[in-house]
Image (spheres, rainbow, N blue to C red):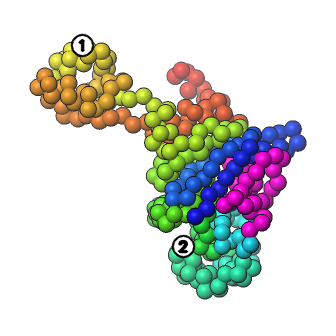
Amino acid sequence: MTSIDVHELTKDYGPTRAVDQLTFSVEPGRVTGFLGPNGAGKSTTMRLVLGLDRPTAGTATIGGVPYASLGNPLRRVGALLDAQAAHGSRTARDHLLALAVSNGIAGTRADEVLEETGLAAVARRRIKTFSLGMRQRLGIAAALLGEPDVVMLDEPSNGLDPEGIIWIRELMRGMAREGRTVLVSSHLMNETSSFADHLIVLGRGRLLADLPMQEFLDSRSRPGVRLRTTEPARLREVLTRKGFMPEQEADGRWTVDGAKAEEIGAAAAAEGIPLLELIDQQTTLEEAYLRLTTDEAEFAAAPSAIARQEA
């Protein structure tokens, strides 16, 4: 199978550095989430990998070869960068047939991916009549056309309904299980957390993180526990003796920062204190991502008057 390898990749647009000496690899057999604020350099990096722009310095290769040197590239790499790029006057089937013929792919493959993406019933409709979600599905169909080893998707769930979001999630996971290399750029943290195995995070063109999902979450969080008990006074005394500082929330639950559920459970059991609820608090991907990128966003709204008053 094939990896995407970026080494010291740099791209300047006049005085602006969009990509700053990036080095990372996207490995086969997993879904890699590609994250970063607006202006972080994600789209520019994907364009450089696909040969749509030239780097100022460094290299971007697919299986050790620049995209421009690939023969019949749709057989090697499938990409969705802009679902609006398809010519509106063509039918969905004709659009895919044109791509197939130009890349040495059998025309029957167009019908297969239309079926796979749920567009078979509208295959002969003009693209200009398509909704955003239908155009998105067509862009994904084009990316799958050559059954490539490498798939690169920019905001693939954009415009999709709930059924479509579940479908694309399972599609990406399935491709990774088959051993393909899957790179997915997204701003939707909750959705990314549902499919990504590995994360690459950019900020102002620089690499901020390149870690497995769980390692990324662990690196940006501190242990904590939420619990309920019928004997809060006794439990508080026991935990305080062990060096913890339990705090009661407005809903009656208790939180214990710096603790793990197994520690609290063992301490309560040793004293015969019943627990009605005991949960390890998990940092979400959104929380971890914001902690990492707060100072890296090129475009950030000013706090509202209400937020300033609350602060």
Q: Position of residue 249 (x, y in %)?
A: 32, 25
Q: Which residue is mark 2?
A: 117
Q: Quadrant of residue 290?
A: top right
Q: Is residue 55 magenta?
A: yes
Q: Quadrant of residue 232?
A: top left
Q: Position of residue 234 (x, y in %)?
A: 17, 18
Q: Position of residue 108 (x, y in %)?
A: 61, 86
Residue at the left extreme?
272
Between 105 and 4, the residue placed more toward the observer is: 4
Between 213 and 274, the residue placed more toward the observer is: 213
**What's under tag 1, amino acid-wise?**
Arg
Q: Is residue 292 magenta?
A: no
Q: Position of residue 47 (x, y in %)?
A: 74, 56
The magenta segment is 42-70
The N terminus, quarter of image:
bottom right
Question: Where 73 falls versus 297 (above or below)?
Answer: below
Q: Which residue is mark 1?
A: 241
- For residue 20, which numbered disc appears in the image? none
Answer left or right for 282 relative to 300: left
How far, Cα to Cα, is label 2 from label 1? 59 Å
Q: Earlier in the sequence, mark 2 or mark 1?
A: 2
Residue at the location (62% across, 75% down)?
145
Residue at the location (81% across, 46% down)?
57
**What's under tag 2, amino acid-wise?**
Thr
Question: Where 300 falls versus 176 (above or below)?
Answer: above
Answer left or right for 1 relative to 219: right
Residue at the location (25% across, 27% down)?
264
Residue at the location (19% across, 34% down)?
276
